Image (spheres, rainbow, N blue to C red):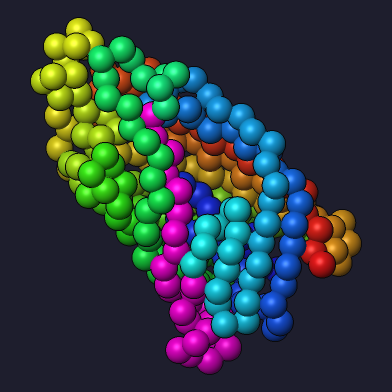
Amino acid sequence: MSLPAVAAGSLVLMDAPPAQTSWSGGVSTRSWPSAPGSRARSNDLLPAVEVLTPEGGFVSTDLGIGWNLVPLLADADTARTWQAGARLWPQFGRPSRVTPKGIDRLGSRVTTEAFANVQAASWLMLQSGFSWGSGRRHDGQVLELGLTSGIPIGDDLIAVTLGATAANGAHLRSSYGIGPGESRASGLPAWRPRAGMMDWSIALSGEHKFSEHCSVSGQWLDARLVGEASRSPLTTSRTQQTFSASLWYRF
């Protein structure tokens, strides 16, 4: 029994590469904070797509677009223990509808992430991800560390992920900062966060297979903003929750 593929925050966890290319499609419902630190929420019903190759390539609405390089560089046993590579992953900004008057809008970005995971024990996966390209000037950087274990539920497994996220000043200023000009225009106090911890999180992920071809997967993530991100005048909720549920058909 293996842990279900998950993407907790920006952490990525995949199944071992398939013996042959697999194609899956379906529908996914998602709910997430409308902006960093926002109490408002965005909800969507979207198509779900996933393509996995034996060489480690993947295109997935859950995992992004990228390549796990281990199958190309090592044997099959190593590929079941290690995951390392890079991917493209979206990072949502602050749309106009939830941006206070006088504060600059923050557009969504596609960031690049390098990831490395290791199955440290039969019950424990250690994860890491370092991304760059976020922020208004694409100079934001984010580091996320986590560990994932599994709880058996009948024939299925619920993955429990504990994570911590740190970011550089450029990322935090774009997401939570208020410059002098914005302060004068909005009436909010200026806020210039420095690099440091951004949040702690816990995530639950699971998958249930109805048959060889049909399955359902889901994830709930609860992140708690800390440090200067939590104290920003733009932050209306320190608790940031995301949820997704997908119905899949494997062709």
Judge whether 221 appears above or below 182 on screen: below
Residue nearest the observer in this picture, 143 or 132: 132
For image coordinates 71% across by 82% down, the residue present is 20
Judge whether 131 appears above or below 54 on screen: above
Numbered marks: total: 0
In this image, 33 relative to 6: left or right?
Answer: left
Say whether residue 69 is magenta: yes
* Quarter of the figure with the C terminus: bottom right
Place residue 200 in its image quadrant.
top left
Does residue 163 appear in this view?
no
Considering every residue shown, the one lying at the far top of the view is 187
Place residue 16 in its image quadrant.
bottom right
Considering every residue shown, the one lying at the far left of the view is 180
* Quarter of the figure with the N terminus: bottom right
Considering every residue shown, the one lying at the far right of the view is 211
Q: Give how far across and how far down residue 118 sits, in percent.
A: 45, 72
Q: Give how far across and how far down residue 157 sits, in percent.
A: 69, 57
In this image, 200 relative to 132: left or right?
Answer: right
Q: Give how far across and how far down residue 75 sits, in percent.
A: 53, 92
Judge whether 194 appears above or below 112 on screen: above
For image coordinates 53% across by 84% down, the residue present is 71
Does residue 12 appear in this view?
yes
Q: Give how far across and how far down residue 219 sits, in percent.
A: 62, 45
For image coordinates 62% across by 81% down, the residue present is 54
Say whether residue 248 is magenta: no
For image coordinates 81% across by 58% down, the residue present is 249
Q: Give the range drawn in magenta.
A: 67-94
